[in-house]
Image (cartoon, rainbow, N blue to C red):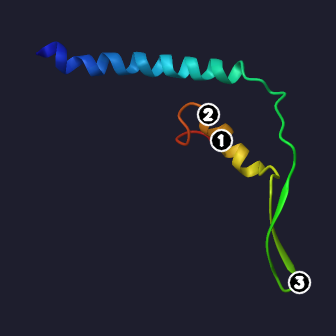
């Protein structure tokens, strides 16, 4: 009974460390040469304003993802 109570407190930190190690290995071994062809799609037109969807990269979202990969985010990352 005591073992069943304490098992999650012992197993979870070990599993958490393993998950972080596997995730970091996947990020290190990924192929950075992948690139997507740029595209634009006209959604609608209002007066003189054309609304367009594009595949342009949003640097703010990429920075947010990079910070999220760091440990203890958002607690102590500026």
Label 3 or label 1, whichever comes before in sequence order = 3
Q: SS at mark 2?
A: helix
The 10 Å Cα crowd at callout 1, few under 14, some 14 to 19, many 20 or more, is: few
Can you identify the residue that label 2 sits on? 69
Q: CA distance from mark 1 to mark 2?
A: 6 Å
Q: Are marks 3 and 1 in contact (CB under 8 Å)?
A: no
Please, is residue 76 above or below residue 42 in the view? above
Q: How many marks?
A: 3
In the image shown, does 76 or 30 lie closer to the viewer?
30
Which image quarter holds the C terminus? Answer: top right
Counting from the top left corner in percent of width and height, residue 66 is at 68, 38
Can you identify the residue that label 1 sits on? 65
Q: Are marks 1 and 2 in contact (CB under 8 Å)?
A: yes
Q: Are marks 3 and 2 in contact (CB under 8 Å)?
A: no
Q: SS at mark 1?
A: helix
Q: Is residue 77 left or right of residue 33?
A: left
Residue lying at 18% horizontally and 13% vertically, measured from the top left: 3
Residue lying at 84% horizontally and 86% vertically, measured from the top left: 47
- Label 3 or label 2, whichever lies nearer to me, is 3
Q: CA distance from mark 3 to mark 2?
A: 42 Å
Label annotation for residue 48: 3
């Amino acid at each position: 009974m005591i073992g069943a109570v304490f098992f999650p407190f012992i197993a979870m930190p070990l599993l958490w460390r393993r998950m972080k190690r596997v995730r970091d290995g996947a990020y290190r071994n990924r192929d950075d040469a992948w690139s997507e062809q740029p595209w634009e799609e006209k959604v609608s037109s209002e007066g003189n304003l054309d609304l367009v969807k594009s595949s342009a990269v949003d640097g703010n979202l990429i920075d947010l993802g990079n910070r999220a990969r760091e440990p203890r985010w958002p607690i102590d990352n500026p």
